[in-house]
Image (tube, rainbow, N blue to C red):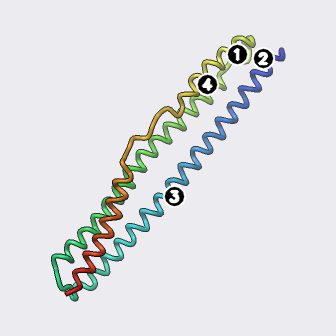
Amino acid sequence: MDEAKKQLLISNLKIINDHSKTMKNVIEKHEGVREKASRYIYQLVTLASVMAGFGFTAISFTKVIELFICGELLLFSSMVVAMLFVKKAFLNEARLYASYVDKLNDAMNDRMQISLDGSAAEIKVAMDNVARKDLRVFDEKSPDINSELFLNLAFYSFIFGGITLLGSFIN
């Protein structure tokens, strides 16, 4: 095997290894983001649930029933908005990461399909074609779910619901 062909094949193998590392990093980042978002939403929903539960426990001490009902509705709406956000965000994120993994897998398969029997020039042309395709792996953008709106809505519903609920016990 001539030296140019050997260098091209070594280069191709290095790129395949880099793709494997990239795929591993994409999966790890996906897990990290998902874990942080899950913890935050879980804490918010749990806290809203506890506050709503305490509110119903103390219903006999309510001075203004309208404020009580409004506060409970705001707390429940906070939980619903948070859970809808998680569902939408996770589904979009899962689709995006699945797309990334599929595209990286295709790129790796294309690289592994490069014929070892061709000349150095043929291998170079095949590698250049695959490299152009590789550049489009991460072109896809995540659909915008307006996460700031969802999270702010859930957070402020929780805050105002809690304040309103507490206000229902004051004469």
Tell me which label, 4 or 1, sits earlier in the chain: 4
Residue 5, label in figure: 2
Q: Of the residues shown, which amino acid type is indicated by label 1? A: Ile
Tell me which label, 3 or 4, sits earlier in the chain: 3
The structure residue drawn at horizontal position 80% and vertical position 16%, both measured from the top left corner, is: 4
Residue holding disc 3: 35
Residue holding disc 1: 123
Secondary structure at badge 4 equals helix
Q: Nearer the viewer, residue 150 or 22?
A: 150
Q: What is the crowding at mark 4: few (fewer than 14 residues within 10 Å), some, or many (at least 20)?
A: some
Residues at marks 2 and 1 touching, judged by CB atoms closer than 8 Å: yes
Secondary structure at badge 1 equals helix
Tell me which label, 3 or 1, sits earlier in the chain: 3
Q: Marks 4 and 2, how far apart in space?
A: 18 Å
Q: Which quadrant of the figure contains the C terminus?
A: bottom left
In the rendered image, the vertical position of residue 40 relative to residue 10, given as above or below: below
Q: Of the residues shown, which amino acid type is indicated by label 2? A: Lys
The structure residue drawn at horizontal position 46% and vertical position 58%, both measured from the top left corner, is: 37
Q: What is the crowding at mark 2: few (fewer than 14 residues within 10 Å), some, or many (at least 20)?
A: some
Q: Nearer the viewer, residue 26 or 141?
A: 141
Q: Marks 2 and 1, how far apart in space?
A: 7 Å
Q: Of the residues shown, which amino acid type is indicated by label 3? A: Glu
Secondary structure at badge 2 equals helix
Left or right: 156, with 112 as reference point: left
